Amino acid sequence: IRLIVEQAKVPVLVDAGVGTASDAAVAMELGCDGVLMNTAIAQARDPIRMAHAMKLAVEAGRAAYLAGRMPKKLYADPSSPLAGLI
């Protein structure tokens, strides 16, 4: 998706493979302009709650994309201070 977004000269929408809110968030974090959804909401046990979760996920994913991800590292590197811990 990221490659498509980088090369596209038109808005990019995801229209398949979105089964839950985390899928929508990832699509938006990768730079998609929007996510079309139907089945994930229509077939959820609680469609109203799923629709709300999707809304929040799309908003969070877009905000994360616009904020910019920190650079990825090959290995995890703890950054929390150790001073003052028991």
Image: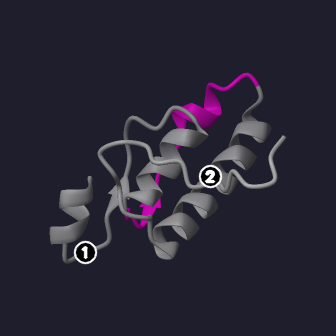
SS class, disc 2: helix
Q: Nearer the viewer, mark 2 or mark 1?
A: 2
Residue holding disc 1? 10
* Magenta stretch holds residue 35: yes
* Overall secondary structure of the magenta section: loop
Nearer to me, 84 or 77 = 84
Nearer to me, 2 or 8 = 2
Segment colored magenta: 31-45
The disc placed on residue 18 is none
For residue 3, side relative to residue 31 (left or right): left
* Number of numbered markers: 2
| Rendering coords of residue 68 (x, y %) | 45, 71
The residue carrying pointer 2 sits among few (fewer than 14), some (14 to 19) or many (20 or more) residues within 10 Å by Cα, namely many
Q: Mark 2 and 1 residues: CB-CB less than 8 Å, in contact?
A: no
For residue 62, side relative to residue 27 (left or right): right
| Rendering coords of residue 55 (x, y %) | 66, 55
Which comes sooner in the sequence, label 2 or label 1?
1
Kind of residue at disc 1: Val
Kind of residue at disc 2: Ala
Q: Name above or below for residue 61 compared with residue 77.
A: below
* Magenta stretch holds residue 63: no
Nearer to me, 42 or 83 = 83
